[in-house]
Image: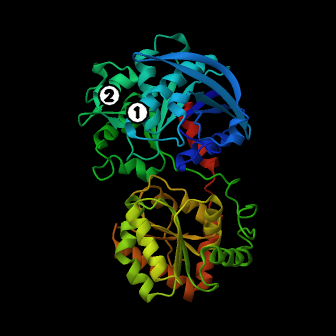
Amino acid sequence: MKHVLFVTSEAVPFVKTGGLADVAGSLPKYFDKKSYDVRIILPKYACIQGEWRQNLMFVDSIYVKLGWRKQYVGILSAIYEGITYYFIDNEFYFGGNRPYGNIHEDIEKFAFFSKAVLEAIKMLDFQPDILHCHDWQTGLIPVFLKNFYEDDEFYQNMKTIYTIHNLKFQGRWKIEGVMDAAGLPRDLFTPDKLEAYGEANYLKGGVVYSDIVTTVSRTYAKEITTPQGGEGLEGLFQEKGDVLFGIVNGLDYDEYDPAKDRRIRENYDKMSFLQGKPANKRCLQEWMGLPREEDTFLIGLVARLTSQKGMDLLACVLDEFLMREHVQIAILGEGEEQYENMFRHFTWKYREKISAKLQYSEELAHQIYAGADAFLMPSQFEPCGLSQLISMRYGTVPIVRETGGLRDTVCPYNEYEQTGNGFSFANYNAHEMLDAICYAKNIYEDHRDAWNGIVYRGMECDYSWTKSALEYADLYSR
């Protein structure tokens, strides 16, 4: 049996700010329990809700040396849905009201977390064969392991896999600051190691020193080897090509199941969506304050309101679109002030057509997935994306830009062959996006049988973690 330890800065159900938490918390459940013992370790943030904090069990405590500092490490554990979670406790680093803060604070925080994880695993009744590290916050673990622990017999056969969920965030800071925060010698900060463009780079360190590197979709694995998608590190990924793999994220089908979801008005499956979705559409219209019009094309959008998510494309054409089309749009999210103000303005100007809730609500998100007819994701880049998978699971047709995991999972509708599970556009262009939306609206309004076929094919797709877990298991076996 292989022992695998997921090292992550967040994981459901304990703490979540984005898709990383969904992946880290749900994927371990899908491995064959006879062949793989997969556990998770993350920080014990003060912002973890009390109901979860109360059930943590004390394991041990140690002190670790981090440069000139000597810091306390508490080790706690919990079991959730059959998976063991470990927690690193230190109130100085993890005592804030949110997981992440300013980058200069996070640089030291996650240097400590990386060192603490490596020291803490000696105190567990679990010796990992593989450390599966996620995103820049864990980038120093392979660095520490390969440079400071290889002479220790406990660590000699330990391997590392490093998964990049979003290359845009790399953990970059001044070299002198990282040397002080992490206690690393200057000879590690060279262009072939941790240095990039005059700065220290945690993510680069993780890539350089890991045995295998993965991203969260096949297309994204190719995109990061190009100047357009490589965020300045494309040369490194080209060099790592023989150990770089793209494995598309899956979906927790227990959490996202329209047949059992208690957050939606009426349950349904792929055989009963024609009866179930209208009730959820009415509920969504009520929730958003939109007119109850069963046949009006209703588009949902749940996202961070940033340019990465394509909000600048919407800014170009939304006024034009709402002025000429009879349509409804339900928006949930928060983000950059310019886009929040944009949606406030359009909600005021076109109150019968668009409603925006500038917040995050898990309950409302589920109702949008269940109640909308289509789901819009015009992302500039999208390493994988989960929303298009959720929307298809709930019978809501995705309209996406062909990038990253969106390209891997959404097959555009072909009206001649009656194939496809969604609609897509190729170039990052506002009017190309608008053409895709209008085409989808036309099929919904004038060719309802064809539309229902798209819905059914999307609901038939299997994007559960089962297949992806087998691909990760293959990498573990290597």
Question: In this picture, is 267 found above or below 442?
Answer: above
Q: How far across and how far down the image is residue 444, in percent?
A: 56, 83
Task: Give the quarter of the image for residue 143.
Answer: top left
Determine the residue positioned at 26% across, 26% down.
190
Sequence-earlier tag: 1 or 2 = 1
Q: Quadrant of the N terminus?
A: top right
Front in this rendered view, residue 110 or 26? 110
Q: CA distance from mark 1 to mark 2?
A: 9 Å
Q: How far across and how far down the image is residue 164, in percent?
A: 45, 42
Question: In this picture, is 474 found above or below 427?
Answer: above
Determine the residue positioned at 52% across, 82% down.
351
Q: How many marks?
A: 2
Disc 1 to disc 2: CB gap under 8 Å: yes
Q: Say if residue 382 shows up in the picture.
A: yes
Question: In this picture, is 65 found above or below 177?
Answer: above
Q: Secondary structure at mark 2?
A: helix
Task: Give the quarter of the image for residue 148.
Answer: top left
The residue indicated by pointer 2 is 177
Residue 107: numbered disc: 1
